[in-house]
Image (cartoon, grey):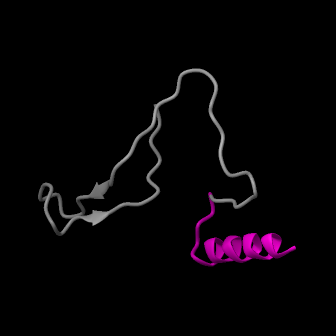
Amino acid sequence: MRKRKILFDVQRIIDLNGYTNSHVNTYCSFTPSGEYYSIEGNTKLDFNNSGCDVEDLIFPNLKFFH
């Protein structure tokens, strides 16, 4: 029963922070079938269009489509 409470609390925090495309459950991992690719790193957003510099903000949860 404790696991359920933790999942509920985590989902509540996600919802309170305005994330609408996230869901928490007990399914922890999987191996996709077929060909797949992984992207790792940080995405930065250049708001002032000055080129890549230290003032650029990290843009988390950016979706990449192919």
Classify residue 23 by image quadrant.
bottom right
Residue displayed at 58% across by 72% down: 18
Q: Which residues are magenta?
A: 1-21
Locate the N terminus by quadrant: bottom right
Q: Determine whether 33 is above or below 5 in the image.
A: above
Horizontal placement of 14 versus 24: left or right? Answer: left
Residue 16 place in picture, x, y as percent: 63, 78
Q: Determine whether 48 is above or below 37 in the image.
A: below
The secondary structure making up most of the magenta span is helix
Residue 27 place in picture, x, y as percent: 73, 51
Front residue (pair 45, 5)? 5
Q: Determine whether 59 is above or below 6 in the image.
A: above
Residue displayed at 45% across by 37% down: 38
Residue 42 place in picture, x, y as percent: 33, 54
Q: How many marks?
A: 0
Front residue (pair 16, 28)? 28
From this viewpoint, which residue is outermost toward the right?
1
Residue displayed at 28% across by 58% down: 45
Horizontal placement of 53 versus 65: left or right? Answer: left
Would you say residue 4 sits in the magenta stretch? yes
From this viewpoint, which residue is outermost toward the top?
34
From this viewpoint, which residue is outermost toward the front?
2
Residue 55 place in picture, x, y as percent: 18, 69
Residue displayed at 32% across by 63% down: 58
Front residue (pair 6, 42)? 6
